[in-house]
Image (tube, rainbow, N blue to C red):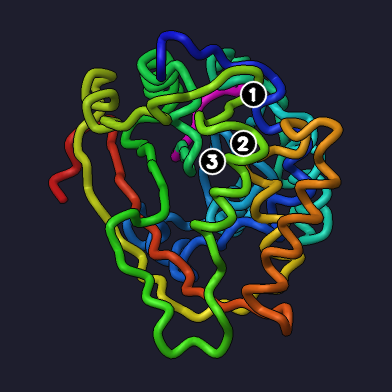
């Protein structure tokens, strides 16, 4: 992370209510892929760090006896708790409001730790070392993200594509050309190089899995608006008193792009890197 940027608790403020509707889902075979790769059998404990509204933790709930989600945003924790109750898994899940840097936080040890598009917001070396110490012998860390290198063609889809480039330009017109992040900015974006961080922490690996996406998704204008407001760099609070004007302009942009109010795109593939506490021989 840039030396000039510091985390603050407004990073995802106000985004939780939009997250489940607005974010593109992970590939449908995610649970099966992790279950097979890690020999999950409904026992053990999962810790999902930076869990958001439970997007990954709840999908994996049946593969573990206990699931713990950790996130610093109160709205995310509240959404995760509500969704867990709605899915009937409240008794086997718990949701902790805390930053990853506060681990181990008395949470005990785990069979698997997951980071789903969250690790880049943390003090990565500190958190990697800490969670390695929280894993049981033979445990694993799974780092998940959308596959960035694939071409998600819109050819053959039944509705117009989501006009991401024009939407990004509208956000920049309101918020400025430099990416916003909480009360600060990220001119260089978020960091990469996770492999070096996990290796320094003493993990062995990685083992790479790609869970194929590509399935067509139909999205409404409301879904697309929710997607914009679910992002840290276009969180609702960043627009201040101009939020209503921004949303009006955004909806007009979407109306012009798709007068019928329907868009289509393809679900992204999910890339998983598995890191183990000791060599596995795989």
Where is residue 90 shown, x and y percent of the image?
78, 49
Label 3, label 1: how far apart the Cα atoms are: 29 Å
Q: Residues within 10 Å of mark 3 (few under 14, many from 20)?
A: many
Q: Earlier in the sequence, mark 3 or mark 1?
A: 3
Mark closer to the observer (2, 3): 2
Q: In this picture, which residue range is highlighted in magenta?
A: 106-112
Q: Residues within 10 Å of mark 1 (few under 14, many from 20)?
A: many
Q: Earlier in the sequence, mark 2 or mark 3?
A: 3
Q: Secondary structure at mark 2?
A: helix
Please report the residue visible at 68 percent of the width from the left and 64 percent of the height from the top: 253
Quarter-wise, where is residue 107 in the image? top right
Q: Which residue is mark 2?
A: 232
Label 2, label 3: how far apart the Cα atoms are: 26 Å
Where is residue 271 shown, x and y percent of the image?
34, 54
Residue 68 visible in this rendered orientation of the protein: no
Residues at marks 2 and 3 touching, judged by CB atoms closer than 8 Å = no
Q: Is residue 77 above or below residue 210?
A: above
Residue 84 located left or right of residue 142 = right
Q: Which residue is mark 3?
A: 46
Please say whether residue 107 is one of the residues in the magenta stretch.
yes
Residue 198 located left or right of residue 100 = left
Q: Which residue is mark 1?
A: 182
Residues at marks 3 and 1 touching, judged by CB atoms closer than 8 Å = no
Where is residue 261 shown, x and y percent of the image?
73, 78
Q: Residues within 10 Å of mark 2 (few under 14, many from 20)?
A: many
Near-viewer residue (187 or 25): 187
């Amino acid at each position: 992370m840039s030396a000039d940027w510091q985390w603050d608790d407004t990073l995802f403020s106000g985004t939780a209510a939009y997250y489940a509707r607005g974010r593109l889902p992970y590939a449908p075979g995610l649970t099966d892929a992790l279950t097979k790769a890690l020999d999950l059998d409904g026992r053990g404990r999962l810790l999902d760090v930076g869990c958001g509204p439970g997007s990954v933790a709840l999908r994996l709930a049946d593969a573990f006896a206990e699931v713990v989600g950790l996130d610093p945003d109160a709205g995310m924790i509240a959404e995760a708790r509500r969704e867990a109750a709605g899915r009937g898994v409240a008794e086997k899940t718990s949701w902790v409001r805390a930053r990853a840097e506060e681990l181990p936080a008395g949470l005990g040890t785990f069979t698997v730790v997951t980071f789903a598009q969250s690790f880049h917001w943390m003090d990565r070396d500190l958190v990697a070392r800490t969670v390695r110490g929280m894993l049981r012998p033979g445990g694993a860390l799974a780092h998940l993200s959308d596959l960035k290198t694939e071409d998600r063609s819109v050819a053959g889809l039944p509705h117009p594509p989501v006009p991401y480039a024009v939407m990004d330009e509208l956000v920049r017109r309101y918020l400025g050309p430099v990416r916003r992040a909480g009360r600060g900015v990220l001119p260089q974006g978020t960091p990469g190089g996770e492999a070096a961080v996990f290796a320094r922490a003493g993990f062995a690996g990685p083992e790479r899995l790609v869970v194929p996406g590509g399935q067509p998704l139909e999205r409404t204008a409301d879904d697309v608006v929710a997607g914009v407001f679910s992002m840290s760099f276009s969180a609702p609070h960043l627009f201040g008193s101009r939020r209503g004007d921004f949303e009006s302009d955004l909806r007009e942009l979407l109306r012009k792009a798709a007068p019928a109010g329907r868009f289509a795109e393809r679900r992204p593939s999910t890339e998983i890197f598995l890191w183990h506490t000791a060599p596995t021989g795989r």
